[in-house]
Each structure stands twice: as structure tokens, then as C-alpha cells.
Image: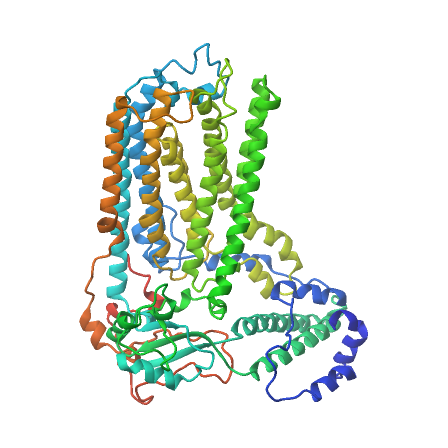
Amino acid sequence: GLRQGGAEESQAFSQGGMQRPLREEIEEEDMSEVDERVPLIRGRSPQNVSSSLSSAGYAPPQLDYQLAERLAMESVARQPDGSLYPVDTRISHLGTLGTGVGLYLYFAYYASISLGLMTLLSLPLLLLNLQGTVVFSTAEQIGFPGNLIAVSTVGNLSGGSPLLVHSLLDFLSVLAFFGFLVYYRRRELLARKEIETRNITAADYTVHVSHLPPDAISEEELTAYFSRFGQVAQVNICYKGYAERARLMDLKENTEEEMAEFERQSVDLRMFPMAKENRAASALLLQQVQRELEKMNRRRVECCGHAFVTFMLEGSCRETVAEIKSGAGALFVNRNQSSAPPFRKLYPLRVEKAPQPSDIVWENLEMTERSRSWRQLGTWTVSLVLLLIATCLIALVNGKHFFLPQAGVLTGALLNFVCVLIIIVSNVAMFILIPLLSRYEGHITSSSFEIHIMLRLWLFQVLNTLIAAAMFWDASQSATGTTDWAHWYADGGVLLINVIIGDAVLMNIIEFARPFDVWIPRKIEGPKSRSQARLNKVYAAPELSLGMRYQVVLKHFFLALALGAAMPLNYPLITFFIIVTFWIDKHNLLRLYRKPAAVNHQVGHVAAVYVGPLALIFHLIITPYLYTVVTECPTELYCPPTWALWGSYVLAVVGILIVALGWKPLLFNEPEIEYDLVRARALPYTHVQDISNYTPPRQIPGVSLEGRMSVSPEQPRESFTSKYFRQEESEIGISVF
């Protein structure tokens, strides 16, 4: 309608009238309940509002870019006196930035220390490898620069070497890294204990209920059902249509901002001759959005299957989670494991501890689990297809020995560079695509979103690099035409080191410069802004993604551990790049990112409890294999174990047993911490000052989410000024390290 109406429709609206068909449509519209299948405005998100106004002849306003930059800097984390934190501030003094941020900084910090210790332990291995003579022998004829890398690996050792010193020092390196994981895990538990004992949040009193039927829209009914576990303070039910309503509300707010800007421009028509026409077009769009919102408000209200039940006492919340154990959401449902009957005697509910209100992605609650599963399957398929394409391209390039049997040094170096370029480009492509794909999956919490980003990026980049290096086996031939491991380290090993260096340098440059979400939007989208408010949004400081940052550290130390026993040069390289990553992240956190929201510990928990031990197990399995093939059958891809390396096998088995047996008590298990039970049992939810609730920011009007309070509204709330009762706004203000 906007594009077809042209100037005549805009002029008619600006003179106080509307075109007759549109007025008649509004007057004749039925005010009764509308069908849910009625289509709403599509394709008019806040990002493409400018396209609907371009036909009106937009005149750019006068924008204050310095103001936008100043507002962006004001959103950066600051000290209590209002000044910026010094870049060299100790991590223990950054408690106000949140537990999740502090845990990440400590993860990178202690990972660099543990890898530095492994570097010291690997120096004797490097010296022992340099004493070998295989790489520079006339039979191999390994060219430059591959010979400089291969000479530092076990491929330079002659067959029959016992490698007992290698195995012993590598075993000590494994213990050092496992000690880092245990120490970091203790730090994480300490942080959680400090936060949960000294702070009261809405999540302490609230359970997340799912698998509710669509007609479960009565707060009184849910209150009556959960009252068996304790006094209910309030019930917040989530309804269908929230995502669409939030999109329309964002469009409405942006259009109102444009109208205000065009109203200001209309004062000076000489400078802004199209101001009135632009305002008329915005007003027409605003009226269309309001009509669609009215249609949504008249729809039949249905529950999307989720609700948040807040109890008066924290003990009631814990009792509810303990009594109703997973219900319909479990893989194997045990009807007798809950003392509570199913909801309406028909619907077994899933009840779990509620996340923080700021961690919930409200728009995704109405998405069904089946739809979410299909979306995750689709995104994983896209990721695997991209991995397959990259692998096929690398295989094609690595086939040089079939059509270039006498390839020279320059040709071989060029083909190796092409392989490295393919890997880095595919990694950068996934670096950009994975967050978009993960957002499409519709995760209920931001923490789950960050975890999926971390795991997917880590897995893809590690597989992409290791598979590419392994495919150099057939292309690694000596002067006699036989394939051997010395040549593989000169080809595949060089590829691995080039990827580590190139990927780390490129990713750190991207993170430091932030071209995709800072520089490019400000240079391209900034001049197109139609108002100062829109320009301020374009210049807004970016947000920190813990999943993106964790995956960088995880990828680095996994690659270091993968072939570190055979290529000890990996340890100092990875140590250096993790140190650089740590300082870049700390600089951006204190100078570029907006102050982080309250983030929990789950991302760091997955990294330390699952990914770290998996990297150690992989290292302990592949190390005896690399030692065996290099010393016993250097021209074969596999050979059976030998008694000559019995010490290596024993140490590897002992290392696996230490990790396997120590994983559950030292990493997985969480101690039963009895928190302040006096506070938990005696302090009611309604007596906590300024505590948050689970009301969505874009709720449908007329639907009460305040719940039925179990205390009289006139009853005064007791005030607590002790530091032990600070609320969500200050819960991250405790230094726990």
C-alpha cells in the first residue's frame, strides 16, 4: 500500500483525510474475535522500514555522530566512581561484570598458564627430536620450509626408539592440564556458592513449568495445583503470539521515532522539502501496524505450554523440583516417581528450576519442541555440508601427487597455501554463520544459545583442521616414491601449524577490529539513519558472546593436545595465542563491549566438565598410536602395538584411568552446599525489595501476568538493607575470586 499509493495518498493523509477504500475497511472491520489464520504484516521488521519510505524521497537529517559515539562509550562497564576500568585491572576486581565473564577470563588465564607449563615440559622433547637424522637424510629429500618443522617432531627419530622420556614428560603434561581443569572447576563452584548464598533473585523462588495444555490460561487453576507444595506468590503464563506481537511493537516504536524526526524536519521545509510526505508515509505505516496489533489483541488467548510459578518461600521451590521429576518431557516416563498427580489428571508436567528472567528469550517459548528439533537438525546438516565441501576441496588440492608427481618447492608451497586458505575461509564462514543458525533454532535461554555456538564452532573447526591434515598422508612421499611419516609432518604438520597461526591471527584481528558489527554498520548504515535515535542504535556498543570466545580457547588447546606429543612446537604457539586472545578480550570488555548482563556459569561449566576431559582422552589415545607408527612402521598408516613401547602404553592407560575415575568426583559432581537456610526459609518472596518477576516485556494487554498474590496488597513489605539481600541488579557485584 505504501509503495503503490505514491505522493497522492501521502498528500491526502497529510491533509487530514484517508483514501476511501482504507477508511471503509477500517469502519467495516468486525470487532469480534478474529481467526488466528488471518495474515499479519510480513517482512516489515525494524531493519527494512527504510525500504518502505524510500519511495517518498527521503532527505537525510543532521546527525550528531560524536553524541552517538559518546553514548556507546557510556554503556561500557565502569567503576563505581564513573571512570573506565584500567586495562590492567585484576580479574578479581571485575566482579561487577558478572560471574560468567569472570569465569571466562579465568578460564583463558589459567589455560595459558597450564599450557605454558606444558611448554616447559616439552622443551626436552623438542631437543631430543632435533637430535634425529631422518628429515635431512638424502633418502627423504624434504624441502624447505617443511624440513624446519618436521625436524622438531618425532618423525625425525629413527625406527626402534623407545620414546620412554617422551612418554614420561607427556604424562606429566597431561597431569598439569587435568590439574587446571580441577582447579578451574573449584573456582566455578566457589563463584556459585558466593552468589547463591549472598543474593536473592526471582529464580530462587520460581520453577519453570512446561507441557501445559493450550487452554491452561487460568492463573487460579495453576495456583491451586502447585499450592500443594507451598504458598504460591504469583503465576506467570506465557501465551501464543508473543513473538509476532514483539515484532510489531518494535516496528511501531521505530515508526514513531521516524514520525517524530520528520515532524522536526517539517519546521524547515527549505532544507527538508520531503519532510511532510515522509511523515505521512510513516503515519500510514503506523496505522497499519496498530490495526494489526488490534487484531492480535482480539484473538483467542491460548497458552503456549509454558508458565513460571513463583512460591512465597525458596524451600517450596526446591521441594517442587524434587517431587515432580521431568514428567512428560522425560525419555522414559515413570508415573510413580512423582507424588503429585498429573495436571487435570491428564497432563504430566515437566518442572525444573527457572532461569533468570534476563536469561529467557521470550519470543522462543511458543516454539514447539518438535519444531526446535527439526531446526537443530537442519542447522547441523548445513554445518556438515559446509564441512564436507571444505574437505572435498582440500582432497582435490592434496591430489597433487597424481597430476604433479614432480612438483617443485614453489608449487608445493602454493598448494599448501591453498589448503590453508580453504580451511581459514571455511572457519571464518562458520564463525559468521553459526550464530545466525543457532539463533534460528529458537533456544529458550541465552545460555543455551551460547553453549550451542561454542560446541558447534569448536567441533567444526577442530574436525576441519584435523581431517585436512590427515588427508596429506597419500600426498607425503619420499624421494623413492614411498609414503612415510617424516614427509607427513613436513606436509600435514606444516598445514596444522599454518592453520593455527593464520586462524589465530585472523580471528584475533576480527575480534579486535570488530568489522562486522561495529566498523561496517557504522560506516554504511550510520549515514542512512533517519533520526538521531536510529543512529544511536547503529553506534551502540556490541555485546559479549561468551560462546564465541570460549570456542577460540577450546579450539586452540584441543589442537595443541591433539598432536602435541608428536609436535611439541604446538604448545608454545598455542600458549602465545591464548595469551593474546586473553588480552584482546579483556581490552574489548573494558573499552568496547557494553556492560554485560547477568550471565550464569553454564557455558564455562560445559567447557571444563565435558570438552576439556574429552580433549585429554583424545590426546591419551592418539599419542601411543603416533609413537608406534613412527618408531615401528614409519611407512605404514597402522601397525600393531609393540613391546618396545610398553612404557608409553602403560602411562597412557594410567592417564586415561586418572581422567575417567577422577572425572565424576572432581569435575562432574557438585557438593551439596547447604546455603543460608534461615534466609531461604524465613524470607518470603513478597518481602524482598525490588526483586524481579517473570513478566514478558511485550505481553498482550488485558492479560494479567501479575498473578494472584498470596498476601494482601495492603500488607507492607519488610525492608532489608543488609548486603546479604541484594537483588538481581547487584547480584553480580561480588568478587568471588
Q: Is residue 462 left or right of residue 348?
A: right
Q: Residue 505: percent from the left, percent from the top?
A: 48, 37
Q: Is residue 207 left or right of residue 434?
A: left
Q: How is the image coloured?
A: rainbow
Give the position of the N terminus as an image quadrant.
bottom right
Q: Is residue 503 left or right of residue 331?
A: right
Q: Residue 232: percent from the left, percent from the top?
A: 31, 81
Q: Find the residue positioned furthest to the right.
A: 8
- Rendered position, 392 above or below 132: below
Q: Residue 648: percent from the left, percent from the top?
A: 27, 28
> Depth check: 269 or 568 in front?
568
- Rendered position, 11 above or below 490: below
Q: Find the residue positioned furthest to the top.
A: 138
Q: Residue 107: percent from the left, percent from the top?
A: 33, 47
Q: Residue at x 41, y 57 (%)?
A: 77
Q: How many marks?
A: 0
The image quarter containing residue 168 is top left
The image quarter containing residue 115 is top left
> Depth check: 665 or 258 in front?
665
Q: Residue at x 40, y 78 (%)?
A: 236
> Depth check: 34 or 57 in front?
34
For the question of whether residue 485 can be seen, the reply is yes
- Rendered position, 524 above or below 336: above
For the question of whether residue 230 can be seen, the reply is no
